[in-house]
Image (spheres, grey):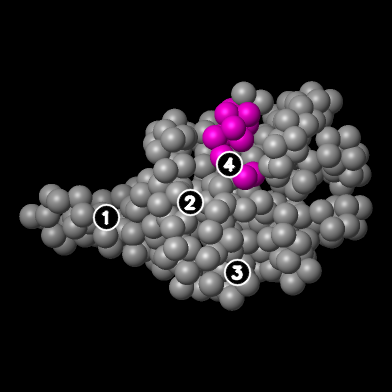
Amino acid sequence: MPLVSPKEMFAKAYAGGYAVGAFNVNNMEIIQGIMEAGRAENAPLILQVSAGARKYAGQNYIIKLMQAALEDCDLPVVLHLDHGPNFEMCKAVIDGGFTSVMYDGSHLPYEENVAETKKVVEYAHAKGVWVEAELGRLAGVEEHVHSEESIYTDPDQAADFVAKTGCDSLAIAIGTSHGAYKFKGEPKLDFERLAKVSQLLPGLPIVLHGASSVPQEFVEMCNKYGGHVPGARGVPEDLLRKAASMAVCKINIDTDIRLAMTATIRKHLVENPDDFDPRQYLAPARTAVKEMVQRKIKNVLGCSGKA
């Protein structure tokens, strides 16, 4: 099955009160693990590529890996650019075959964000490609995306932004953050703000970035086998499930996959010090990715059986 647009995928999610997972990919094993999980759960998938992953693996390599993954696959799958930093990169991936892009102008002054997002929208729509934009700012660090503070999305400004840009979906800031260290105090999301945004923008798919849960068993495993990620905390899965039952149709998950994969590799190498064949530790790491994605599909997204 060829790559698809998120349009129908999100329409079903919005109506059904669930979300679709957007899982970041960097290499073959991560792609394989995600695809295996999607098939096991019969769930729609979004595989997304950050600017850093595109630089690391190469755009053509990722597209070829996706083509291989889609052979004999009957799942709806979107290939999405995550945090596109400029028009040029958005254009390059659109021309390369991506079916969805996110242009991130959230760090810009409002009117400049509007103008740049609109430029991406006009190019993408002419090619039949979906555009996600962002308004508000998430704290934390994710590759080139770095903010010391969180600026929550203003609902009225969000309505104005969508009207002016014509974007298809909107990433908003309601309390999530990038990276593994999301909360110092009690974790909470601003559901009242989410409800207001969805009231002003009925039918518009909302996106949550920085929405990994940072499962503590993998933090502990990573630290036990030589890692150093003390105090890492994520968004509780029940809060994300509530958001998915509202207008949130896409939830981004990256850190949890990294943690599961790295903790599993660390454990294998400590317990099997004679192993030096990459296949020996990458195979269990791939299984860890599959199991993590299945967990998210069932417990957080609610999209099992929705392909």
- Kind of residue sitting beneath label 2: Thr
- CB atoms at circles 3 and 1 under 8 Å apart? no
User: Residue beneath label 1, please?
Assistant: 282
User: Residue beneath label 3, please?
Assistant: 307
Of badges 4 and 1, the one in the foreground is 4
Give the CA separation, mark 3 to mark 2: 24 Å
Residues rendered magenta in the picture: 89-100
**Going by the image, does 307 lie left or right of 63?**
right
Disc 1 packing (10 Å; few <14; some 14–19; many ≥20): some
Q: How many marks do you count on the picture?
A: 4
Mark 2 or mark 4, which is nearer the start of the sequence? 4
Residue at screen point 66% across, 63% down: 19
Q: Nearer the viewer, residue 126 or 210?
A: 126
Disc 3 packing (10 Å; few <14; some 14–19; many ≥20): some
User: Residue 186 appears in which quarter of the rendering?
Assistant: bottom right
User: Quick one: SS at disc 4?
Assistant: loop
User: Quick one: SS at disc 3?
Assistant: loop
User: Quick one: SS at disc 2?
Assistant: helix
Disc 2 packing (10 Å; few <14; some 14–19; many ≥20): many
Mark 1 or mark 2, which is nearer the start of the sequence? 2
Give the CA separation, mark 3 to mark 1: 28 Å
Q: Nearer the viewer, residue 209 or 57?
A: 57
Give the CA separation, mark 4 to mark 3: 20 Å
Q: Position of residue 241 (x, y in %)?
A: 66, 68
Of badges 2 and 1, the one in the foreground is 1
Mark 1 or mark 4, which is nearer the start of the sequence? 4
Of badges 3 and 1, the one in the foreground is 3
Residue at screen point 28% across, 62% down: 284
